[in-house]
Amino acid sequence: MSAVIGKAESLRDAYGKTLLALGEKDPNLVVLDADLSGSTRTVLFGQKFPERFFNVGVMEPTMMSIAAGLALQGRTVYASTFAVFAAGQAYNFVRQSICYNRANVKIVATHGGLLVGADGGTHQIVEDIGLMRGLPGMTVIVPADAPTTRAATVQVAEREGPAYVRLTRENLPTVTDGSFAIGKAQELRSGSDLTIVAVGALVARALEVAEELSKVGISTRVLDFASVKPFDAPALMRAARDTGAILVLEEHSVLTGVGALVASETAENYPVPVRRVGVPDLFGESGEPWALLDRYGMSKERIRDEAWELLRGRGKVQ
Amino acid sequence: MTYAAQSGHPGGSLSVTDILTALLFRELRLDPVRPEWADRDRLVLSKGHASPAMYAALALRGFLPREELASFRQLGSRLQGHVDRTKLPCIEASTGCLGQGIGMAVGMALDARLRKASWRTYAVIGDGECQAGPTWEALMAGGHYRLSNLVVILDRNGLETDGSTESIMGIEPVAEKFRAFRYHTLEIDGHSFPAILGALAEARQTTDGPTAIVARTVKGKGVSFMEGKHQYHGKAPTKAEAEQALSELARPSEGNA
């Protein structure tokens, strides 16, 4: 089985349109934004349902408290802004007002990671997955494409409790068939020599490298790990057992992200060699978005090198 | 409670006790038999460290057994150091870290408006909390949305953990700030029941926006050695102090009611 890499689509458009459709079905749903509704696409909902849309301006911490207050009265609440504001600026408000209160708030954060590009390091949060998955009760989803974004937007509403969905500013190629399910990894390519676990923008790169490796006889399994919390422990343990080595790709700090998760879970339960490709312990900078990924250690060459390193260790190649 | 727990916040609990008494025993539409009654008024204690006063008032109002008060701050208790809605159904919002309660109250008031419900939302805040930026974010939102179903009550006891608010980071003129944030603002003696109830009645008559009540209070009210002492913000009394405090508090009130 090998996945096809489809045309690039906007995850933010997918979110905005899905949210609008959800709002048409559910009169109990309300949406908040913090002066970025054009960028996050919540404007689509806001234009159709102005009475259920609250653009609170530049007050992200308090947006989270207001969202919690609405949710505690029984509403399903979506709150959107850039990831650096949602997870960074508002962290303790997400923690206490939403998570500690077990409020039914779905934070859909756009502009996660380095792919923010020209705005530079201030806005390129590479710590958000770690911050959010550390919160008790929080669901964390990192879609790789528009179909997963659509599915995740719907599914977080069906699951009671707080959620954080991290979207990317850049359009991303379609790599899944939209069969995302919370708690499940999606096997986009089967393989037996090596597993690549990837999230977000790097899933497409994982598939490209897997295809290249297949030309030299290496069979690579690719898991889209969009459901970071809860994560698919059985799929991860199967990957460890079946392939004996795991490479993790994420557009996030390697200190606290999915690589850290995979390394600690396998170390405890089924120790195999794990290597992490992601952002080192650094802030980003301004630049063309995809060039930033290359510069900060996530180029296809680097991914290939790390794959070879694992394969050599396993005696699969010289 | 704070003596038994040997931790907690007696000073700011005593300053807000009369306010909570007025709210829980007179102003709020509540039913102890149905703590989650849909049409109840909502009270958010943003200064969640005043939990001893809240628990005591809730117990006397019939929301929890009085014997349970002894479990305050103990392992496994519903009576957390800072009020926790997930453990105690009559608490509307878990608070503790400051600056978050008004925002939650604004969300509740928006919900009531959307539903065209008649219940009202009350937020009780502390004065140290007025140094926190998000307090003013949330106040701005309440004013912007003209939430006439929202009342913010400031327990203006003048003291915070390290000393007086005005020597640490002055919040005055705080009533003018509330007015500038579009609140119908009243300044009252926070230990006078007629004044508190009168202000709350006036808030009910205010239909064009939210009301803020600056309630001037005394930290440690009713306990001679605690009154006006910031040292009792977050410090439990000794055994002798607790006995003296309880005996002073048991005396009939003198004059201000």
Image: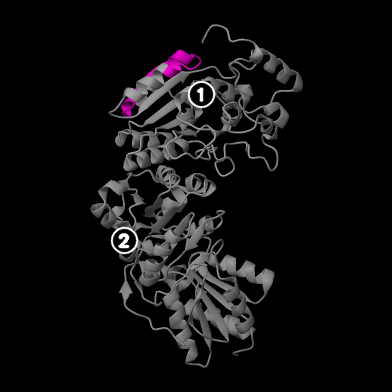
Name the image quarter holding residue A149.
bottom left
Secondary element at tag 2: helix
Chain ID, mark 2: A
Horizontal and vertical percent position of residue A34:
34, 48
Asked whether disc 2 touches disc 1, contact meaning CB atoms under 8 Å apart, the reply is no
- Which residue lies under the disc numbered 1? B25
Does residue B19 appear in the picture of this structure?
yes
Neighbour tally class for label 2: few under 14, some 14-19, many 20 plus, Cα within 10 Å: many
Classify A111 as above or below A193.
above
Q: Amino acid at mark 1?
A: Phe
What residue lies at 39% left-to-right and 34% top-to-bottom? B119
Residue A85 is inside the magenta segment:
no
Q: Kindly give the residue lying farthest to the front in the view shown.
A: B33
Chain ID, mark 1: B
Q: Are marks 2 and 1 on the same chain?
A: no
Horizontal and vertical percent position of residue A76:
40, 52
Classify A262 as above or below B84.
below
Left or right: residue B91 compared with residue A123: right
Q: Kindly give the residue lying farthest to the top in the view shown.
A: B255
- Which residue lies under the disc numbered 2? A16
Q: Which stretch is magenta?
A: B179-197
Name the image quarter holding residue A6.
bottom left
